[in-house]
Image: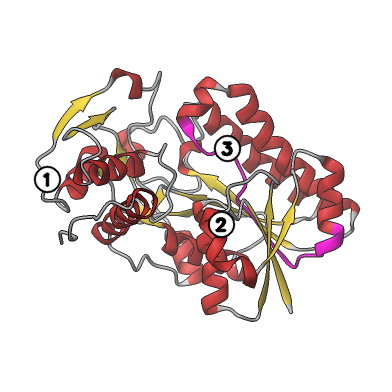
Amino acid sequence: MTTALITGITGMVGSHLAEMFLSEHPDINVVGVKRWRSNTANIDAIKSQIKLVDCDLMDASGCFNLIKSTRPDLIFHLAAQTYVADSWKNPQSTFSQNVLMQLNLFEAIRFCQMDPVIQIAGSSEQYGKVEPDELPITEDNQFRPLSPYAVSKVTQDLLAYQYFQSYKLRVIRTRAFNHEGPRRGEVFVTSAFARQIAEIEAGLKEPVMYVGNLDASRDWSDVRDVVRAYWLAVNKCTPGEAYVISSGSSRTVRNMLDTLLSQTKEKIEVRTDPARLRPSDVLLLKGDSSKFRELTGWAPRIEFEQTMLDLLNWWRAQLSTHSNIKQPATST
């Protein structure tokens, strides 16, 4: 039986990836990596169907024991500090965590003399400052990172390339553009907006939406489409290569907010909150995933409006579960 090791399994992406394996690939033995203090709410429903291993990837000896004991055939390296805004507040920890975790993982694989296929989850943030005439973004666009988080992801990407060249580790570098859906952390803009709407519907806050920069453009996909892409990547992509994963369409944060607001009956005022503005922001993101699509046959299946509705309904359910407040009927 093939063993798939998922780092960061308790996060949005990791939990959806594990669920996809259980529902669509029951022949895969799923092993999830978490820290002992991790919140497991996202995987509580499937805990009995997977194997969980406590390991801090910042600990080199722990990584060695992890790889030695689980002997994975596939590794999906999703664990990271992924919040861009937090990287401005904690640049040292963002960089050290994201780079050292991957370095320890690579060294453990090397010293255990194993040969798994390894998917490294990169980000569209790596491209950073993109001029309008450079769109859409392909694998060949120049990196101009605009945040400490983005610099850490560029480093992960290049480190993966180096270990492929130096040690022939079978690394697949994916650069997924923004992906959203149920379980998205509340610090991210889509989820922050959805939560505020759900709180307003539940009578927990005044009907005012606090926002940052609404003019930035993003290329959004559904997380369930992206985890399907990750599975295709380890099966059909070429080790050492990089692949953009994106919807191929771009919309502003304002458009995303309007989509969410159209899914509620509440009348909500929108106000700018200066605290939500960043020192510098990526303004233009639109990906060209034709390289990946031609090789794998992948294409998004879930419409953006459905993704936003599912995220909003998830927050409605979260508030209902934790506060026992009856939620209003879903607006479609």
Name which residue lies at 28% across and 62% down: 303
Q: Residue 234: image x %, image y %?
A: 62, 65
Which of the two discs, 3 and 2, labels the residue nearer the N terminus? 2
Depth check, mark 3 against mark 1: the one in front is 1
Taking depth in this image into account, of 250 and 149 the one nearest to the observer is 149
Which of the two discs, 1 and 2, labels the residue nearer the N terminus? 2
Badge 3 amino acid: Gln
> Mark 3 — residue?
81
Q: Is residue 144 magenta?
A: no
Direction front: furthest residue: 324
Image: 93 above or below 135: above
Q: Is residue 81 magenta?
A: yes
Q: How far is mark 3 from mark 1, CA to CA?
A: 34 Å
User: In the rendered view, does 54 fall on the left or right side of 259?
Assistant: right
Depth check, mark 1 against mark 2: the one in front is 1
Badge 1 amino acid: Glu
Q: Residue 78: image x %, image y %?
A: 60, 50
Badge 2 amino acid: Gly
Which segment is the magenta one?
68-84
- The label number, if any, that marks residue 266 in the structure image: 1
Question: CB of mark 3 within 8 Å of CB of mark 1?
Answer: no
> Mark 2 — residue?
14
